[in-house]
Structures are given as structure tokens and as C-alpha cells.
Image: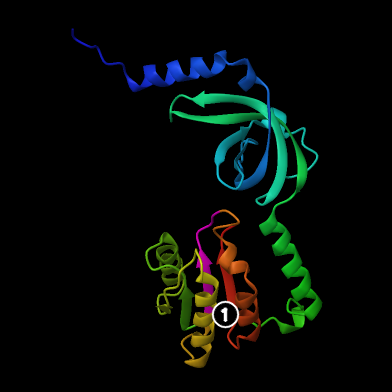
Amino acid sequence: MEITPITITELNKYMKDKVAEDEFLQNVYVKGEISNFKNHYTGHMYFTLKDESSLIKCIMFKSFAERLKFMPKDGMKVIVFGTVSVYERDGVYQIYVKAMKEDGLGDLYTAYNELKAKLEKEGLFDEKYKKKIPFMPERVGVLTSKTGSVIRDIINVSTRRNPNVYIRLLPVPVQGEGAGEKIAEAIRLMNEKNLADVIIVARGGGSLEDLWPFNEECVARAIFESKLPVISAVRT
């Protein structure tokens, strides 16, 4: 007997119809922590909801997002109400959120605020300690991944505005365990060897977890102790 294969579109539509038949999935309350939040220019909100071992994609259309009394952000714990459905084009299921309320702050976000308050109390963010950035630096030190698109963007923009600038890349890990210490070490090395007139610490964005190395205390203190001005180019 010859078996006639179905198309991917037909399979995804079948899965969407099956999910739509489940009454439980039409009105669900789900709690979790927000990650990879994007407030799109259309007014729609895209984010991931996660717990200790799983995650699910979510979308909140503009008509529902406009009713929110707070702005969601990475690390925030929330309870969402919505419908689970299959996005046929990509073959993934996600929550179409109709309402959302705060359920406290995530652990990383809480740790971030606590560290920020501690360093502010010590005066690390005082304006009087900020160093003047040279108008036309001859040497720019860049601390980022050597394989990412960020360094290419920095080279393109910098050389277009100042063809004579010398860009020195000092590759550092921008994610994962130990990355914060490596970034702090690179800042200190730039200072000790006088390798640049200004330092750029860069990364091309990500979730709060992905960006966490740049929020670590050792990095903040290395920047504060730096004799060279440091520019943050970490996309949040």
C-alpha cells in the first residue's frame, strides 16, 4: 500500500486544530519568570516565560498590552492568562496572553537591584568619578567576543567616522560562568599596559541571564578603578 505523505503545512494545521480542541488550553493561568522580553514597535509584546526547568514562548498583542498597568521586563515574575495555540508557520506552540499581573521579582533581577543599591551607597556611580571621553581617540580598546557581529559593527562605524583610529580587540567571553572575571581582568590589563585611550565593553544583547556577567560586582569595580574611560555598549 502506497502511503501519501502530507506537507509540513498540513501537519502544523492538524496540530493547531488538535490543540484548539482542548478546552483546558483555551483558558490557562501560567506563572513564571520573563526572559527575552521585546516590546515591539507595533505595540505587540514578545517574551519567554520560564521556570527552573522549562520555558514557553509568549505573545501579547497590542490590544491586550495597552491594558497593562506596568511594563514587563526581564527577570520579573508574573502570572499570565491566555490561550495556548500553535503558530503554524514555525510549528511551535505558544501562549497568546490576554492578561498579566506581577508575581514578584525573579532571583537575578532581585540580585541586580541589591548590588546596584550597594554600589550606589558606596558612591561608585557618582558623576564626579566619571571620566571624560576623548573626542577623537587614536586607540580604541574593545572587549567583546571575537566571533560576534558586535566587533564588525564597531569597526565599521569607528573607521567610517575616524579613518585613522586604531582598534585593538581583546577577546573576552561574554556569557557563561567565569565571564565576569575575564571581563574585569581585561579591563585591568588595558590599563596596566596602556593599550588604549578609551575602552568599549560590548555585547549584542540577550536575556538578563545572558547579560549577567556584565552586571557582576567585579566588573563594576574594575570599571570604577579604571584610569581609562569605559563605554558600555551592551545592548539590553
User: Which range of residues does the magenta coloring cover?
Assistant: 199-206
Image quadrant assignment for residue 226:
bottom right
x 59%, y 35%: residue: 58
Q: Is residue 217 above or below residue 50?
A: below
> Is residue 72 shown to the viewer in this render?
no
x 56%, y 45%: residue: 53
The image position of residue 225, as x and y in percent, is 64, 86
x 56%, y 67%: residue: 213
Q: Amino acid at mark 1?
A: Phe
> Is residue 164 shown to the viewer in this render?
yes
Frontmost residue, 142 versus 11: 11
Q: Which residue is mark 1?
A: 135
Image quadrant assignment for residue 108:
bottom right
x 47%, y 75%: residue: 142
Q: Is residue 86 above or below residue 74?
A: above
Magenta stretch: includes residue 204: yes
Magenta stretch: includes residue 114: no
Question: Which quadrant does the N terminus fall into?
Answer: top left
